Image (cartoon, rainbow, N blue to C red):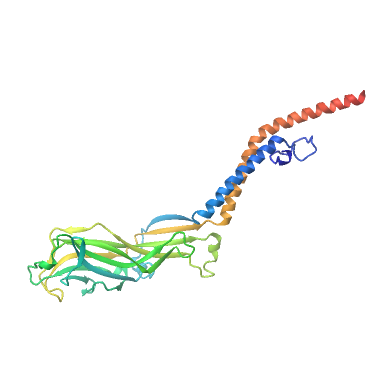
Amino acid sequence: MYNLDFLSEPPQISFLRKDSNQTSFGGFLFLIYLLIMIGISTIYVVDFIKNDKYNIEYSLIKNTEVDTTELNNDDDLNPLLNISFDLTKFQFFNSENLSERFVIVDFTNLQKIPRRTYIQKRPSEIILALFYDCEDKYCEIKEEDKTSFNYIFEMNYTGYTIDHQSDDKPLYTNNDKFFKEDFAFSFKNTLIRYANWQVIKYKEERGILGLFDDLFDIKSEYISGSFEFSESVNMEEPLQFNETIFDFGYNRFLGFFIFANEHKEHVEYKRIKVSLLDLLANIGALFSTFFACFIFVFKFYSKNYDNYKIVDSIINKKQINLKKKY
């Protein structure tokens, strides 16, 4: 146990002719210290192997001053989406497509939008109107178009994939993935929905290595987004046009969908990789902290032990000298 005592400090007076006055108690404490640290280090290593390799931070950034025109000219912040629309109605346990009398119109150019056909639009360019094509100004709904439930306006658009623990890109636009939004509307009133494009930014915190990203053209920020919809507003009396504003005659206004990209806020993710060096640094810090605690506890014993050994050494030396005289 004496040789395991690494807790004892060099004494002011060395009476054992060693760098420290080693004790069996000090060796016992040091052995306990080693066992504790081996156990904690094992737990840290297993935790590093089994758990996530990235620490994730989430923030919602408010933008008080923005130049919408400039930002909407950025292809990343205002991307070109593949988007399609459809109209259906519930019939008990299944759904049916609505007749062609239900029409979707691009309100920016007053052109009909075909259903279930993907078109390309930027979030800031989408304003849609939903009409029922009437035969006359009284605009009675056809019997085959009636339903006991709601009508559904369906929208599908290009989605993204986010994987916080991916060793490759954590965020990317996925052309094989589409987000779907459904909105219920009726023939009795006009539905108004507002949607804003929610930009998502994902940043890799690369530490010192990030200083060389520009030099080696390494990308550390990824951008995508999705639509965030506000609550719906239903007008008590539906809007109805009794003049042929569009080339398909009289019509009844059933819905109005306004999309925008205002950049008033955006979601931001940051991730930092937990490396092997981080593991070693954490374990090293624990070794130092526990070692300091053991030394602090042992110091009270060591001081008394040193004093005892000094007195004991002096007494023994005097007894030896007395024996030599006689």
- Horizontal side, residue 14 vs residue 246: left or right: right
Q: In this picture, is 207 found above or below 97? A: above
Q: Residue furthest bottom?
A: 247
The image quadrant where one finds the N terminus is top right
Q: In this picture, is 177 found above or below 44? A: below
Number of marks in the image? 0
Residue 263: give x, y in percent of width and height. 34, 62
Of residues 290 and 105, the one drawn nearer to the viewer in this rendering: 290
The image quadrant where one finds the C terminus is top right
Of residues 323 and 41, the one drawn nearer to the viewer in this rendering: 41
Residue 291 appears in the figure = no
Residue 273 appears in the figure = yes
Q: In this picture, is 296 found above or below 223? A: above
- Horizontal side, residue 316 vs residue 164: left or right: right
Residue 232: give x, y in percent of width and height. 22, 58
The answer to which image quadrant residue 161 occupies is bottom left
Of residues 324 and 59, the one drawn nearer to the viewer in this rendering: 324
The answer to which image quadrant residue 119 occupies is bottom left
Residue 219: give x, y in percent of width and height. 48, 67
Q: Residue furthest top?
A: 326
Q: Residue furthest right?
A: 326
Q: Residue at left 55%, top 63%?
A: 209
- Horizontal side, residue 27 vs residue 98: left or right: right
- Horizontal side, residue 111 vs residue 205: left or right: left
Q: Residue furthest front?
A: 93
Residue 72: give x, y in percent of width and height. 35, 68
Q: In this picture, is 307 found above or below 236? A: above
